[in-house]
Image (spheres, rainbow, N blue to C red):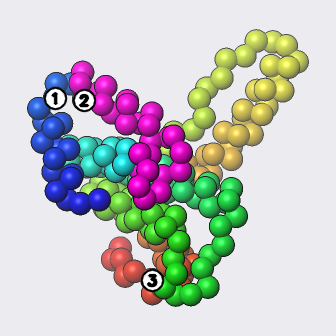
Amino acid sequence: FSSHFALQIWIRSKAMDARQRLQLLEKLHGNAGIGTPVAGTNALACYQQLYALYFSEQEYLQAATVAFSLYSALDRSVRHSGEAVPASSFAVTPVLEQQRAALLMLISALTLTPEQQLLMPGPCKPSFGATGEDMASLQSWFQEATEVAHKAAVSLQEAQTMLAELDLKCNQEPLAVEP
C-alpha cells in the first residue's frame, strides 16, 4: 500500500461532495467484509482505501477502527484455518504479515488520537417480545455482548503489546515502539 495510492484517494475524496463520500465509504465497508483480506484481494484493497480515506481526513478513530477490524478479520481467518506459525525466522505467512501491517496501522492512528484508545461497537441491540423463545435469544445476546465487551476496548499500549507478541510468533525481533 503506497503513499502515492493514498494521495490519489485523498485527492479524489476532496473532489466529492458529502453524499458521494458517504456512498463510497458504504461501498468500501461492504466490500471489505467479502472474503479474507490478504494480499491481492479486493477485501484488502477496500480496508486499505478506507484507512487512507479516514486517515487523510484526520478521522483517526475511524482509521483505527478499520485497522483493528482488518486485524480481527485476519485473526478469525488464522483461527478458522488452523494456520501454523512458521518455524523458520524468515518464513512468515502472508496472513501474519498482513496482521502485522494492520497492527502498525492501528498504532499509527491511535498515536494521533487524544484518547489513545479504541472502543469497538458491540453487537446490535435486539428487539424481543415476551415469549420463551425470545427470552432464550435475549440471554444469548447478552452472553455474546459480554464476550464482545471484553474485546471491545483496545488501547495504544495493548496494540503495541499485540504487535510485540505477533513479532515473537513470527520469530522476528520485536519492533521497538515508544510509548
Locate residue 146, reporting x and y percent: 68, 43
- SS assignment at label 1: loop
Task: List the single residue furthest toward the right.
Answer: 132
Q: Earlier in the sequence, mark 1 or mark 2?
A: 1
Asked whether the residues under the numbered discs 1 and 2 touch, taking CB atoms below 8 Å apart as contact, a structural biologist would say yes
Q: Mark 2 points at which residue?
A: 21
Q: How far apart are marks 3 and 1 (CA)?
A: 41 Å
**What is the quadrant of residue 24 in the picture?**
top left
Which residue type carries mark 1?
Met
Residue 25 included in the magenta stretch of the image? yes
Residue at x 24%, y 21% (from the top left corner): 19
Can the viewer see residue 47 in this picture?
no
**What is the quadrant of residue 148 in the picture?**
top right
- SS assignment at label 2: helix
- SS assignment at label 3: loop
Residue 13 included in the magenta stretch of the image? no
Q: Mark 3 points at which residue?
A: 174
Locate residue 98, reporting x and y percent: 45, 63
Foreground mark, 3 or 2?
2
Q: Name the residue under label 1.
A: 16
- Total numbered labels: 3
Which residue type carries mark 3?
Pro
Magenta span dominant secondary structure: helix
Locate residue 86, reporting x and y percent: 60, 79
- Image position of 176 with respect to 97: above or below: below
Q: Distance between the residues labelled 1 and 2?
A: 6 Å
Locate residue 133, reporting x and y percent: 85, 19
Which image quadrant: the C terminus?
bottom left
Q: Which of marks 3 and 1 is nearer the N terminus?
A: 1
